[in-house]
Image (cartoon, helix red, strand yellow):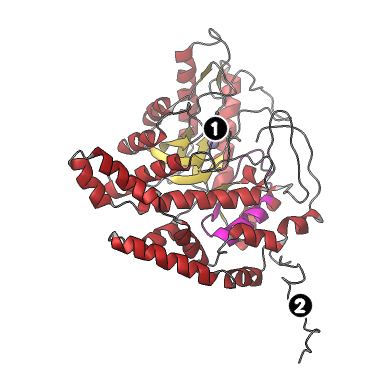
Amino acid sequence: MSMPGTRRRSRVERGLAVTNSNRSLDEELIARHNATRLAALQDDYGALSRTLERRGIAIDAIKGKAARLELALPSWGTGIGGTRFARFPVLGEPTCFDEKLEDCAVIQQLCRITPRVSPHFPWDKISDPRATRERAQQLGLGFDAVNSNTFQDQAEQKQSYRFGSLTHTSAAVRDQAVAHNIECIQLGRALGSKALTVWIGDGTNFPGQQQLGDSLDRYLGSARLIYAALPEDWRMFIEHKLYEPAFYSTVISDWGTSILTAKELGPKAKCLVDLGHHAPSVNIEQIVARLHAFGKLGGFHFNDSKYGDDDLDSGSINPHQLFLVFNELVIAEQDRRAEFDPAYMIDQSHNITDPVESLLSSAEAICVAFVKALMVDRALLSDYQGANDVLMAFRTLRDAYGLDARPIVAMARFEAGGAIDPIAAFRESGWRASQASTRKATGRAAGIV
Ligand code: AFD
Ligand code: MN
Ligand code: MN
């Protein structure tokens, strides 16, 4: 029997909230964290449940859908990013793919809606994909879409992408870029992935630099070769982007080019919407509706932006836009006019926050937007739309947006074994500091990731 004052302190009390065996957080920490917050959560959940009941909406069905939301984590988002001018590393940030996986496992352990990782090649060096897949499984993770990179030159490559990759005027460069994408598919197969995301930086910086029509022809020629290498059950996501690094014209610049290209390639080719890849004020939710209408909505890269492709944390600038995007997704799932199976991924650059905290915060923001869209009284909205009661139709959306969705998201997370307040639990765990002693320091070199 232990004497008062001599009781052996728990791992959490001793600041050992990290298990040594699987390099993730101690479940005891999460349980203790939840124990102090559960009563308040139940209270808030009960209040929201009564509000929704008055509107004829069952809270448990919404909670079930929130629990089934799945967001892929970007491997590249687990490290500290930077701008063209500077990067401010922190001690304990991941230095290799295995360490990125460990951070992703911590995120998944805490929030329970991020079960897969989306790798980026060749940034992620994976020499033994089978071993990596097993390691991920041990950590409770799988793999989502693999991303190719033909927007940078690598030390060992023969041809330069200075003037383009899949659309380059030289066949040798195009061949190299195609071969890289096919290699990504092979790596992805070994990892258990089911999709390839292709974003190219190809375009021009000066009028007259290239024939605008010809570069798209060359893109299609290259993309057909990649498409032909896709396994039967794979999809190819075409990610459009308005500008950067090609500031005068981009080959796959917008959703129009993306959908036309996807239609040319065939049924496995779909469009990927990165929220930051549009001109300011573009109606992205309408793009979502259009892509779905033609069966080409492939997936998302969630992030937010103030000026351009800023890669800010999801929902940090315009949570209402995120809600309106999810409003279209809820409609798309219900109307079934086309197959509906979009891949949800986060694509952000974390320059001054801890990436784990930003990803936890973003996962919550995305799930909150989804839940708010689920709380819309669809029957009422449809009546107002039919009667052209513009203000009340708008108010119906606003009535859902105005509700605090967090108790549903937190309850779903808690019931799935996660933390009621994931960022607080992450801080309590001392994870980052505990990694600082084993992970080597990273460099200061500037660079946008
Ligand atoms: C680009 C795209 C993209 C690409 C990434 C690299 O958003 O998905 O893979 O940057 O960080 O802007
Ligand atoms: Mn993206
Ligand atoms: Mn981007």
Type of the residue with mark 2: Arg
Q: Residue 306: which numbered mark, if any?
A: 1
| Residue linked to disc 2 | 9
Closer to the camera, 142 or 320? 320
Quarter in which the C terminus is drawn: top right
Question: Quick check: is the Cβ at mark 2 less than 8 Å away from ligand 1?
Answer: no
Which sits earlier in the primary sequence, circle 2 or circle 1? Answer: 2
Residue extending farthest top:
208
Residue 164 place in picture, x, y as percent: 59, 21
- 86 drawn magenta: no
- Mark 2 nearby-residue class (10 Å; few <14, some 14–19, many ≥20): few
Name the residue: 65% across, 59% down. Answer: 426
User: In the figure, 271 relative to 436: above or below?
Assistant: above
Side (left or right) of 338 relative to 82: left
Q: Nearer the viewer, mark 2 or mark 1?
A: 1
Q: Quadrant of ligand 1?
A: top right
Report the span colored magenta.
Answer: 100-127
Quarter in which the N terminus is drawn: bottom right
Type of the residue with mark 1: Lys
